[in-house]
Amino acid sequence: MGREKIREFAVAIGADDPVYLDPEAARAAGHPDVIAPPTFAIVLCQWGIETLIGDPGLGLDFDRVVHGEQRFRYVRPLHAGERVTRTTTIEEITFRVGNHFLNTRTDMVADDGELVVTAWLMFVVRGE
């Protein structure tokens, strides 16, 4: 994760805490470099989401998808300069009230094997 990508995200969402923007402020707060705002993890989920959308076996009609829920569980903040491996898993697909619900989990693991953050996303595929 690049420092500039984290800075761009922080500016875009109006997160002006210096630990997101200034390496010296981040180090003074005990971090190795700038840290990513908590919702930055959604950027790292993008690859898994795109894979789901493009999977013909899943048959996901993205034109009918709405974002239902999103949550994160952090072990520690993500920081600039680190590499993480992301694994996206479909946890559950259900059908209720004429709509499909697709629940995914993305685990983000640092190069040293430490789980850093888990993100859960729910997509609602509206019925016809």
Image (tube, rainbow, N blue to C red):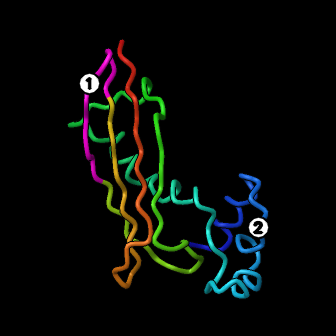
Q: Quadrant of the C terminus?
A: top left
Q: Identify the residue at the far top of this view.
A: 128
Label 1: few (<14), some (14–19) or many (≥20) C-alpha neighbours in 10 Å = few
Name the residue rendered at 31%, 26% in the picture. 100
- Residue behind mark 2: 17
Left of 12 or right of it: where is 112? Answer: left
Q: Secondary structure at mark 2?
A: loop
Residue 35: in magenta span = no
Name the residue rendered at 47%, 29% in the picture. 66
Left of 114 or right of it: where is 13? Answer: right
Where is residue 7, by image quadrant? bottom right
Q: What range of the chain is rendered magenta?
A: 89-100
- C-alpha separation, residue under disc 2 versus residue under disc 1: 41 Å
The label on residue 95 is 1
Residue type, mark 2 in image:
Asp
Q: Position of residue 74 (x, y in %)?
A: 48, 66
